[in-house]
Image (cartoon, rainbow, N blue to C red):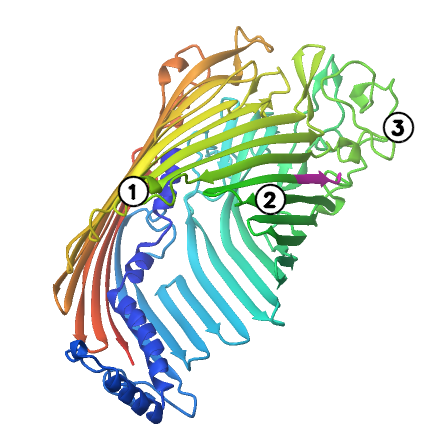
Amino acid sequence: MIARRWMAEFHRSPARARAVADETAMEHGRKTLTALVLVAWFASVVTAAEAADNRSDRAAFRTPASTDIPEVKVAESCEEFVAADYPARCDGPIHWLSQTALRVGGWTAVVDGSRNMIGEYQDLRSSPFWDVDHLGTDGVRSLDGFITGTDNEASRAAWNYAGPDVRADVEYQRFIHNLSPGPLDNFPQLETDPVTPGDYLPVPGDFVAEDLNVGQDYAMRVQQLNARFQGDLTDKIRWRLNVWGMRKAGERQVNSLANCFNHPQIAGDQRQCHLLSRRQQIDWLTMELEPVVEGKWESLTVSYSRPMRSFNQNDQSLMRLHNPLPPIYNREAMPPQLGSEAFPGGAFYPYAVVPENLTQTDKLKLGADLTDGLHWYGMFYHGSTENQHRNFQRDFGGFDLRLTDRTIENLKWTTYGKLNYETNQLPTVLISGEQLTFDRYDETDIECTWSDSRAYGGCGCAPVVVPCVVGEDGVPDFFASDALVPLIDYTRTTLGVNGRWTPFRGDPTWRRGLAVYGRYEHRWLHRENALSNVTLAPGVVADYDQQKTGSDIFHAGVSQRWSRAAETFVRFTTRHDSQPLFGARSSNGTTNSSLPTHTDLVEIGGTWTPTPAFLANLTFGIQNRAQHSSVADFDEDSYPLTVSFWYAPTCALSFSAGYAYFTNWIQQAVTLGDDMVNDAAYAPVTRYWDYGGRSEVWSVGSTYGWTPCVRLRGDVQYVRGRNAIDSTVFDAPHLWPEVAELARDTMDSIRLSAGFDYQLGHGAASYFRYNYVDYNDAVRVSNNGAAHLLLAGLSGRY
């Protein structure tokens, strides 16, 4: 939903991290230190004799008009340059300049209500804060590193090295991701039987939910590593090595649904759809290693890389009971499903399994300047993904070819072609035998013949809705490879051309800022094994084949830079899709889709900077997405708007503000699967649902240098989100009248930050921050909460 998605983005950056990141002391210290290191190095390489010669040369060429310009004093040594204001080390014949900045402080937090949303990506307990930042160089090599602890659950570290042979950038961070539990309040709940401890009372209706961890919160601790290394093998060949890794460990909520479930702790045969929710301990590790070798020989560039990504897990194994009755057709039982015939009491099956996999790709990139204004580029790749849980492999590959022409004056255009394909192997089994707690081949002792009655697990020839499955042992086997449906393979082909034309580029008037650009692209998407069977009426089965989809995309725009202070643009995009994917209900043939066949988007906007102290930006768009066919019928309109500005009336005072507004309105024909006319199984009812969503983001901030030693700062952000469905279409006697209420979202959030920095002396400062975070959900009130956060600390450098 729109509001919830915007709220997630709004709360993604922790308040503490944002408050820490904008510290004036660290920002000023790092900039000053960088300038110091560069200037000091250039000064230190000038010897005393060179300095004397330079001074005499300047005196000899000094003109009368330049006598008022003060002479620049060149330091005779590194110590002379840095000793006056910036203490630093100048050891040995190679002068190594360095500086270290330290910050320490502490957070005090007071929380009221739920921590689920306000503390989604941060720890809301009182905690210390610290930071160490070091930068050094000898003019040939430089080293920059820092390590920061923002709260009890979050820290960051980075190490950057640049030298004549090797460059390295390593970053590490860890943080907590609190997960809001999904309540099951919309389902009837089990109640304990007061007479028989350990049993439950029967629950009326077709649905029941059971949460084994009611009221428990869930969280994952995330660690991420990102490292990049590079160096030169020769003057024409370079190597690179990219390393990326992420580990997630903690707890999550998982759900599993069993149809026609007879709960063993409820007296009688209470067949219902049973939703089971529980906690699962997870441990996921994703690692990617990409070695790269690239070379350049005159007009030819070649690059080869081999990305290798692995996913491994050490999760808690979960099993749940399935005990449905065998389906009956024409008074005969269907083939065994989920062990219902061989095991009358049911059987336990695994769920919430995340498959381990390994992906390896070979990439080759080529670039060549064919002429002065003609450039060719090609990228070719091939790889595979091995699913180690199901023991099958997916192969993929393709290419991307481009030709860019600049031979025509003021015109740049590119024509390109792309091809991507993916093929899949069929898994050997539906569920591997080692995951089961029973012998999957003991479902019946009778060999399957076409004349056997279905009551005995046979495969009679009578027309049926569900096909009969026969295993390799000659008996009906739900887990045989015959029961597997081939995975969809696809091939995507793209041809296109884009260009940019500046007709008056050399004109001295305002017309030189005119630019016209456009793009046309045609796509083919071909699928294999995209055939599905649906039952339109008893004994009437139809094939839905979604073999191909075609798309045509046209984009055009005009931008005008009127002056250095003003620029405007207008853009238009239209897209036509033929036969987009759709979903089909197998029991009655009902179809629907959220993919449009036609899309139009118009955007206008501009930037205005009349003075160096003022900047304003505006972008507004209108988008329409629609499909009116026998498959789906809907119309959607969206109106995105963003406005921002920055103004600094003086060197000590600045303001910034922003506003973003997004709204969309959808009218779509929706058919509920169990919404029938007079209980007719193959006569579903379709109604038009009216949906509206709206989100707004307001942001205002300011900084003020009150005195040379005191700087004030503050900002406030407000997010408002609304989602709703018109409830008038759900009047009785229609089913699911509560759908409109279940889809409603009403959320508001405020984030306030205020504080000041005080310069204690040379190289030392103090900082104070107050943050207030409030989240209010009118629908799911269990997520409502507010937090008051206070930070105080000191910073210094040496």
Q: What amino acid is at disc 2?
A: Arg
> Which of the two discs, 3 and 2, labels the residue nearer the N terminus?
2
Q: Which mark is residue 447?
A: 3
Secondary structure beneath dot 2 equals strand
Q: Quadrant of the C terminus?
A: bottom left
Whether residue 718 is visible here, answered yes or no, is no
Q: Residues within 10 Å of mark 2 (few under 14, many from 20)?
A: some
Q: Residue 304: where, in percent of width, then height? A: 65, 58
Q: Is residue 536 above or below residue 532?
A: above
Q: Which residue is mark 2?
A: 402
Judged by depth in the image, the label closer to the viewer, 3 or 2, is 2
Instruction: Give the spatial CA distance, label 3 vs label 2.
Output: 60 Å
Judged by depth in the image, the label closer to the viewer, 1 or 2, is 1
Q: Which residue is mark 1?
A: 509
Horizontally, residue 220 falls left or right of residue 238, namely left
Instruction: Give the spatial CA distance, label 3 vs label 1.
Output: 90 Å
Q: Residue 590: where, in percent of width, then height? A: 58, 16
Q: Is residue 388 above or below residue 256?
A: below
Which residue is more in the foreground, 112 or 526? 526
Horizontally, residue 79 falls left or right of residue 254, namely left
Secondary structure beneath dot 1 equals loop
Secondary structure beneath dot 3 equals loop
Instruction: Give the spatial CA distance, label 1 vs label 2.
Output: 34 Å
Q: Is residue 761 above or below residue 242?
A: below
Asked if residue 425 lies in the magenta stretch, the reply is: yes
Q: Residue 697: where, in percent of width, then height? A: 28, 40
Whether residue 509 is visible here, answered yes or no, is yes
Q: Residue furthest top?
A: 678
